[in-house]
Image (cartoon, rainbow, N blue to C red):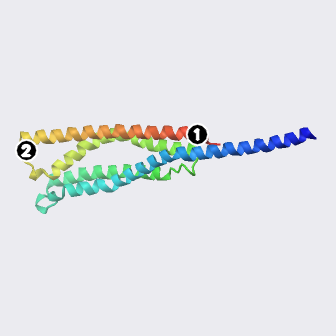
Amino acid sequence: MEIEELKAIWQQYDSKLDNLEKLNKKLILETLSKKPQKKLSWMKYRSLIALISTPFILLLALQDYWKIENIDLKFIIGCFLALLVIVYACYVEFKSFMILKDVDLSNDSIIESARKVSAFKSIFAHRLKYDLMSCPILFAGIILIGWKSFIFNSNTIIYMSALFIVTLFLGIKQFKSRKEKIERLEKEIHDLNEYVS
């Protein structure tokens, strides 16, 4: 009889210990998922802001050139090139935002969350190649839009070339920084996997 009582007590404590272990894992998972969740929220916010601000900033920056006397073939080609780049950039940011919006660390499985972040990472990985093509196209479009306002001398050409190179350099630097953040986020999500019961 004593052995049976000891077995029952042992099973009861074993059950309590299992429940405590599950509770600890759940609390650790919730605590550790806060940091990736903040990063996800920041990336969603950044994509949404880029989606809204890209066309707005370009329209605002070029508002002085939107005059009827400026309209000619160069102006139309410039508008077409700039619009092409804006549509592309907005499409990529919208697609990124929608993928990030679907990531829910609290309700999705870790594998599902990691898959969605991986999909976002693949979109972002192709982006540098297209950004390297779209930056000169946008720059050419802006030059064509403001063609009649520019006085092309050596200072203007040097200034425009320097502006283009600095813009391209900053874009590549920003791309690398964001890529590292996405990789850290992906690693943090994979690290959560050991706490899933």
* Left-right relation of 104 to 160: right
Does residue 125 appear in the picture of this structure?
A: no
Outermost residue to the right: 1
Neighbour tally class for label 2: few under 14, some 14-19, many 20 plus, Cα within 10 Å: few
Residue name at image x 31 percent, y 42 percent: 131
* Left-right relation of 82 to 30: left
Where in the figure is residue 37, as x and y percent of width and height? 48, 48
**Disc 1 residue type (three-letter):** Asn
**Disc 2 residue type (three-letter):** Phe
Who comes first in sequence, dot 2 or dot 1? 2
Which residue in the protein does label 2 denote? 152
Distance from disc 2 to disc 1, alpha carbons, whole Å, reads 59 Å
- The secondary element bearing badge 1 is classed as helix
Residue name at image x 85 percent, y 40 percent: 7
- The secondary element bearing badge 2 is classed as loop
Where in the figure is residue 42, as x and y percent of width and height? 41, 49
* Left-right relation of 117 to 12: left
Which residue in the protein does label 1 denote? 193
